[in-house]
Image: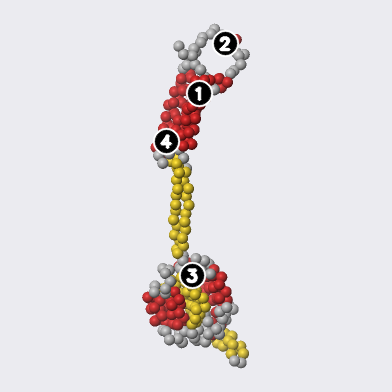
Amino acid sequence: MTFASPAYLFLLLLLIPVIGWYIWRLRDQDASLQVSSVKPLARTPKTARIYLLHVPFVLRVLAIILLSFALARPQLSNRWSSESTEGIDIMMALDISGTMLAEDLKPTRLEAAKDVATNFVLARPNDQIGLVVFAGESFTQCPLTTDHAVLVNLFKSVKFGMIEDGTAIGLGLANAVNRMKDSPTKSKVIILLTDGSNNRGDIDPQTAAEIAKTFGIRVYCIGIGSHGPSRALIQTPIGPQYVTVDGEFDEQTLRRIANITEGEYFRATDNNSLKRIYEQIDQMEKTKLRVREFSKRSEYFMPFLFSALICLILEILIRCFVLKTLTN
């Protein structure tokens, strides 16, 4: 409860002299009837009037208090808030070439990337997220969507061999840009994850980065793989065969893509560092939350005013009809 005119509460200070005057008047009263002794009256039963002697004054004090509160205009306030979120469009471009089967990340680079990306998706319920995969070619596995359950299932179905082998980084990036360029969302992000150097496709990675910049899309590039050689189990015409995968790749191109689009480049050498990279991106790309507060106030002086009136009426009735006084 609040008061629209709290200055009227200072009227309560008037009660100090009023109560002081009443107490002084009681002590200074003279008897209206003098008798030689009050012993014969000692056994006289007390009537209700004796107990009601001070009630009129108490009622008057209550009336002053209630009237002061009524003049101060008490108000009841109801508050509530309305929240609206402004999500971020995130397109994930995932390399599914043969080198992503390297086992320096457990169980493989591809499976580790899928697991961490899935947790990233589930932690951002307000964002539209999509998935583009690329190797020698590129296609859209899932367009931008807020149905993250569907997206997670499509992530699980991603595997090596879905498309021709190779590493078309520029083509994968251009495909991701094409999928989100017409979105009305202000914040647009591409997370590009690869472990190789561009060796396929008709679009140069730098050209694709320039296109992304034109549409205001930031690109976070993640280079995945340890610095030393590792082995990968690849299916061949004569059966599964282990091949050696070089740990070095074209990091300069990935850095250039990040710089052009005002994003960042990261290197993931194991499962933990890959997880920390996604956590860092999650912190940098926070969903915007707007809160609007509303307040509704209603006047509440009538109960106080009505109660003060009742107290005054009761005082008059008790004083005139119960506590009658003799006058000359």
Taking 174 as reference, is 164 left or right? right
Of pointers 4 and 1, the one earlier in the residue sequence? 4
Specify few, some or many for label 2: CA neighbours under 10 Å numbering under 14, 14-19, or 20 or more.
few
- Secondary structure found at label 4: helix
Image coords of residue 311 (percent x, y): 49, 29
Closer to the observer: label 2 or label 4?
4
Between the C-alphas of marks 2 and 1, the distance is 30 Å
Tag 2 residue: 38
Of pointers 3 and 4, the one earlier in the residue sequence? 4
Specify few, some or many for label 1: CA neighbours under 10 Å numbering under 14, 14-19, or 20 or more.
few
Tag 4 residue: 71
Residue at left offset 44%, top offset 53% = 293
Residue at left offset 40%, top offset 76% = 212
Circle 4: residue type: Leu
Closer to the observer: label 4 or label 1?
1
Between the C-alphas of marks 3 and 4, the distance is 55 Å
Q: How is the image coloured?
A: secondary structure
Q: Which mark is residue 128?
A: 3
Q: Nearer the viewer, residue 168 or 294?
A: 294
Q: Nearer the viewer, residue 74 or 200?
A: 74
**Residues at circles 2 and 4 in contact by the CB criterion of under 8 Å:** no
Of pointers 2 and 1, the one earlier in the residue sequence? 2
State whether residue 136 appears in this view. yes
- Secondary structure found at label 2: loop
